[in-house]
Image (spheres, rainbow, N blue to C red):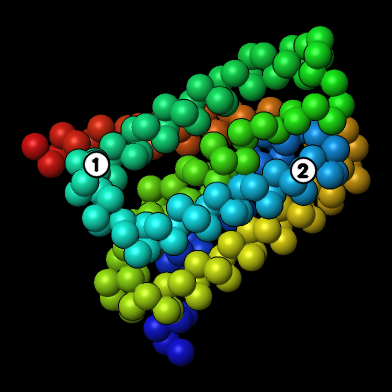
C-alpha cells in the first residue's frame, strides 16, 4: 500500500490540480457547458495517452528522438507563452470575430495543447512518472496516474460551474488573471529548461 501512496502523492503535486484549474477556466471562458465537457474529455484522454506512453516507453522515446526534459520545458513553455499572450491581448477579439459562432468548435485543439500537454501532463509530471516507475514499478505508477486523472476530470467538470455562480464579471476577471499566471508559468518553464541545458554542458 505504501508504494501506491508514495507513487500518488508526488504525481498529485506535479500535476498541481489547484494551480491548473484557474488556467482551465481562463482557456474555456465563453464556452457552453457541453463544449467545456467535450474539452475535458479530450484533455484528460490526451494526458492519459501521453502519460502511458511515457510510463512504458518514455526513456526509449527520449533516446530515439534525442531530446531531454529540458527540451520539453522550453518547447512547452514557448507554446504556453504564445497562448497566454494571445488570450490576454486578443481574447475578446477572437470571441467576437465573425464566423466564430456558438457551437462552431471554439475549443478545437485546446484540449490537446495546452490542456492535455503540457498543463495536465507537463515536464514535472513526466519526470515524476519516470522516477515512480523506476522506484515502485508499473502497476502502482499506473494506478496513481489513473486516480490523479480522475481527480482532474471531476474538478474540471464541477469547478467552473461553481465560479459561474459568482457572475460573469468574476469569471472574466479570473480568466484574465489565469492567463497572466499562465504567461508566468511559461516563462518559468523556459527559464528552468535553459538553466538545465547550461548545467548539463
According to the picture, the residue beneath numbered tag 1 turns out to be: 65
Residue 92's tag is none
Tell me the mark number nearer the camera, choosing from 1 and 2: 1
Element type at mark 1: helix
Residue at the front extreme?
64
- Which class describes the residues within 10 Å of circle 2: few (<14), some (14-19), or many (20+)? many
Quarter of the figure with residue 112: top right
Percent x, y of residue 10: 43, 66
Please name the residue shown 64% across and 47% down the image: 42
Percent x, y of residue 113: 54, 37
Element type at mark 2: helix
Percent x, y of residue 85: 56, 20
Percent x, y of residue 14: 45, 57
**Image-based side of 183 in relation to 138, left or right:** right
Please name the residue shown 50% across and 75% down the image: 143
- Which class describes the residues within 10 Å of circle 1: few (<14), some (14-19), or many (20+)? few
Please name the residue shown 77% across and 48% down the image: 37
**Image-based side of 51 in relation to 62, left or right:** right
According to the picture, the residue beneath numbered tag 2 turns out to be: 36
- Nearest the eye: 24 or 172: 24
Q: CA distance from mark 1 to mark 2?
A: 34 Å
Instruction: Please say if the residues under marks 1 and 2 sit with CB atoms less than 8 Å apart.
Output: no
**Image-based side of 133 in relation to 167, left or right:** left
- Nearest the eye: 171 or 29: 29
Amino acid at each position: 500500500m505504501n508504494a501506491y501512496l508514495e507513487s500518488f502523492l508526488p504525481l498529485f503535486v506535479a500535476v498541481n490540480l489547484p494551480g491548473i484549474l484557474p488556467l482551465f477556466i481562463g482557456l474555456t471562458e465563453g464556452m457552453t457547458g457541453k463544449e467545456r465537457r467535450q474539452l475535458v474529455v479530450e484533455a484528460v484522454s490526451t494526458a492519459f495517452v501521453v502519460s502511458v506512453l511515457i510510463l512504458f516507453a518514455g526513456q526509449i522515446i527520449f533516446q530515439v528522438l534525442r531530446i531531454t526534459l529540458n527540451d520539453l520545458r522550453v518547447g512547452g513553455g514557448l507554446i504556453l507563452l504564445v497562448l497566454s499572450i494571445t488570450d490576454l491581448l486578443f481574447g475578446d477579439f477572437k470571441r467576437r470575430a465573425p464566423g466564430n459562432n456558438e457551437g462552431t468548435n471554439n475549443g478545437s485543439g485546446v484540449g490537446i495543447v495546452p490542456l492535455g500537454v503540457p498543463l495536465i501532463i507537463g515536464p514535472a509530471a513526466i519526470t515524476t512518472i519516470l522516477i515512480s516507475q523506476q522506484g515502485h514499478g508499473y502497476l502502482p505508477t499506473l494506478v496513481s496516474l489513473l486516480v490523479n486523472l480522475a481527480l482532474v476530470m471531476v474538478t474540471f467538470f464541477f469547478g467552473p460551474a461553481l465560479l459561474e455562480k459568482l457572475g460573469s464579471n468574476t469569471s472574466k476577471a479570473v480568466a484574465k488573471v489565469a492567463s497572466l499566471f499562465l504567461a508566468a508559468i511559461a516563462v518559468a518553464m523556459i527559464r528552468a529548461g535553459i538553466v538545465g541545458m547550461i548545467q548539463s554542458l
